[in-house]
Image: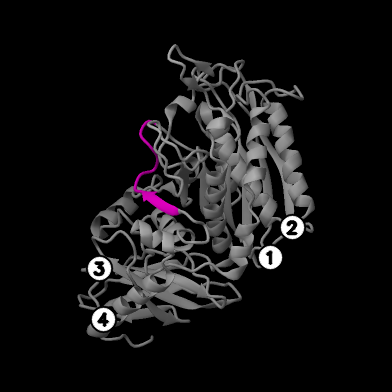
């Protein structure tokens, strides 16, 4: 076991290091807005910057307008009309993802994932629901998987109206456009881990497509270490006309949806309400995507989702997968779930493409790309992280299981005050599986993250007590 630094050394040296990192890494825009990167921030690599430059707002706009052109994409709309309805949208999306796969040298495959949903809430008759998927297989650790999704179905005011035009430009052609653009750009590259690009159906009727996708992954024992849904990411303009074109919200739950009574008892005893796997995933996104390479501020919201709403990350949370939701900074509800119409005052209603900001959507795609690419290239989140509680001491000993990645270089210990929202201190631990810090485990929160030889860091693992 590596000897611990003294308590005084830890408190002074790590604070100084964090301050230096913050000064070096803070982009001009972030500094102007008063946002400063956390101590755990990872500067974008040259490879990542090159990838981000390939994302194209014109392609994103073309995707949104094409999806709108199908008239309606309601889950209960026509599945066999070549020009109108959800079936036409499904077939077009599959062709697009197959085109991406054709450029991948065999690393990417595209497929339809279908099942028949028997009558249920908002599904009056047995209905085929189809997800359109592209899987980019990892070249080093293909068994580790990350998922990014948007939903391609749409609706108007009456959620059961499958006939009226339901353009669904913002909700959620914008999210699907992000997914397609990520698939296009990443198809020609070699991520270490596997990435699944998903356009899911049935969201507006009750998260049916994403539930089926999550069920299939869980049944197969898939090691999904992160999932993002992009839902309503098309506009930077609020209902009062104010604009915030450089912020994206990321909703991340605290108390896990899948928590068992035993896990709840541990959480209550250690105060881990702000340290769920999804919160660590959200902190990771801030670390890698809130910078000058994306041009965006990631506003993490400590909630599973907005009031009265829910998204396609929830079925993943229900199955104990870390997941979070990207949504624009302030919504305009006149352009969501509305019949297309002009009222007596001349106000236009309806989710139309003219109310989208495609440069904004491109920056949202950059945030997704920075997070997904770094996750796929970095080591996996450490497993078996424990904080030893067998004796009463004023120091802290952490243990964990060494990862199997061939390029694993070692580990870092992170810590913060219990009242701090983000990790504030980083201590290099080396290629070990136990480390002692001369700080009381009673006073601060600790975590462990892995580092590879390229300098990519994993999300943080929050340790549970080991007696």
Q: Is residue 106 above or below residue 245?
A: below
Depth order, front residue of 369/266? 369
**Marks 3 & 1, CB-CB < 8 Å contact:** no
Residue marked by disc 4: 12
Q: For the point 24% across and 58% down, which residue is it?
A: 269
User: According to the image, label 1 marks what residue?
Assistant: 139
Indicate which disc residue 107 carries.
2
Foreground pick, 284 / 166: 166
Instruction: Give me the C-alpha separation between circle 3 and circle 1.
Output: 38 Å
Q: Secondary structure at mark 1?
A: loop
Secondary structure beneath dot 3 equals: strand
Front-lying residue, 177 or 455? 177
Tell me the quarter of the picture where residue 64 sits.
top right
| Residue 444 badge | 3
Say which of marks 4 and 1 sits in front. 4
> SS class of the residue under badge 4?
helix
In front of the other: label 4 or label 3?
Answer: 4
C-alpha distance separating marks 2 and 4: 48 Å
Query: Circles 2 and 1: CB distance less than 8 Å?
Result: yes
Where, quadrant-wise, is the C terminus in this rendering? Answer: bottom left
The magenta segment is: 297-308
Which is nearer the N-term, disc 2 or disc 1? 2
**Mark 4 to mark 1 CA distance (whole Å):** 41 Å
- At label 1, counting other C-alpha atoms closer than 10 Å, the crowd grade (few under 14, some 14-19, many 20 or more) is some
Residue at the top extreme of this rendering: 344
In the rendered image, residue 138, in percent from the top left (x then y), is placed at 66, 61
* Category of crowding for the residue at label 2, using alpha-carbon neighbours closer than 10 angstroms: few (below 14), some (14–19), many (at least 20): some
**Disc 2 on helix, strand or loop?**
loop
Q: Residues within 10 Å of mark 3 (few under 14, many from 20)?
A: few
């Amino acid at each position: 076991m590596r000897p611990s630094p003294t308590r005084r050394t830890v408190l002074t040296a790590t604070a100084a290091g964090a301050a230096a990192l913050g000064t070096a890494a803070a982009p001009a825009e972030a500094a102007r807005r008063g946002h400063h990167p956390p101590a755990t921030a990872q500067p974008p690599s040259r490879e990542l910057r090159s990838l981000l430059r390939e994302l194209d707002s014109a392609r994103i706009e073309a995707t949104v307008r094409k999806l709108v052109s199908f008239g309606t994409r309601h889950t209960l709309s026509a599945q066999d009309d070549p020009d109108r309805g959800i079936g036409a949208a499904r077939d077009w999306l599959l062709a697009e993802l197959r085109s991406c796969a054709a450029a991948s040298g065999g690393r990417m495959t595209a497929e339809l994932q279908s099942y028949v949903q028997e009558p249920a809430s908002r599904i009056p008759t047995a209905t085929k629901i189809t997800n359109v998927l592209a899987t980019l297989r990892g070249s080093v650790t293909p068994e580790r998987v990350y998922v990014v999704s948007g939903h391609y179905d749409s609706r108007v005011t009456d959620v059961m109206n499958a006939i009226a035009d339901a353009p669904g430009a913002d909700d959620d052609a914008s999210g699907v456009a992000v997914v397609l653009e990520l698939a296009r750009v990443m198809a020609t590259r070699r991520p270490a881990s596997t990435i699944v690009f998903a356009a899911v159906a049935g969201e507006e009727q009750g998260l049916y497509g994403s539930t089926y996708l999550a069920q299939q992954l869980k049944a197969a024992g898939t090691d999904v270490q992160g999932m993002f849904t992009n839902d309503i990411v098309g506009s930077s303009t609020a209902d009062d006309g104010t604009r915030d074109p450089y912020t994206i919200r990321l909703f991340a739950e605290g108390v896990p949806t899948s928590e068992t009574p035993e896990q709840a008892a541990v959480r209550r005893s250690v105060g881990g309400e702000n340290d769920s796997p999804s919160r660590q995933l959200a902190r990771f996104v801030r670390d890698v995507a809130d910078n000058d390479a994306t041009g965006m501020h990631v506003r993490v919201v400590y909630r599973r989702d907005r009031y009265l709403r829910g998204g396609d990350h929830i079925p993943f949370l229900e199955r104990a997968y870390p997941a979070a939701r990207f949504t624009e900074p302030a919504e305009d509800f006149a352009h969501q779930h509305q019949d297309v119409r002009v009222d007596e005052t001349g106000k236009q209603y309806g989710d139309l493409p003219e109310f989208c900001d495609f440069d904004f959507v491109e920056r949202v795609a950059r945030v997704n790309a920075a997070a997904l690419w770094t996750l796929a290239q970095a080591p996996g989140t450490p497993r078996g992280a424990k904080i030893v509680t067998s004796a009463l001491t004023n120091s802290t000993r952490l243990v964990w299981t060494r990862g199997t990645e061939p390029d694993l270089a070692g580990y870092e210990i992170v810590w913060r005050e219990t009242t701090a929202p983000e990790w504030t201190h980083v201590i290099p631990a080396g290629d070990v599986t136990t480390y002692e810090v001369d700080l009381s485990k009673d006073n601060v929160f600790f975590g462990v993250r892995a580092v590879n030889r390229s300098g990519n860091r994993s999300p943080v693992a929050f340790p549970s007590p080991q007696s």
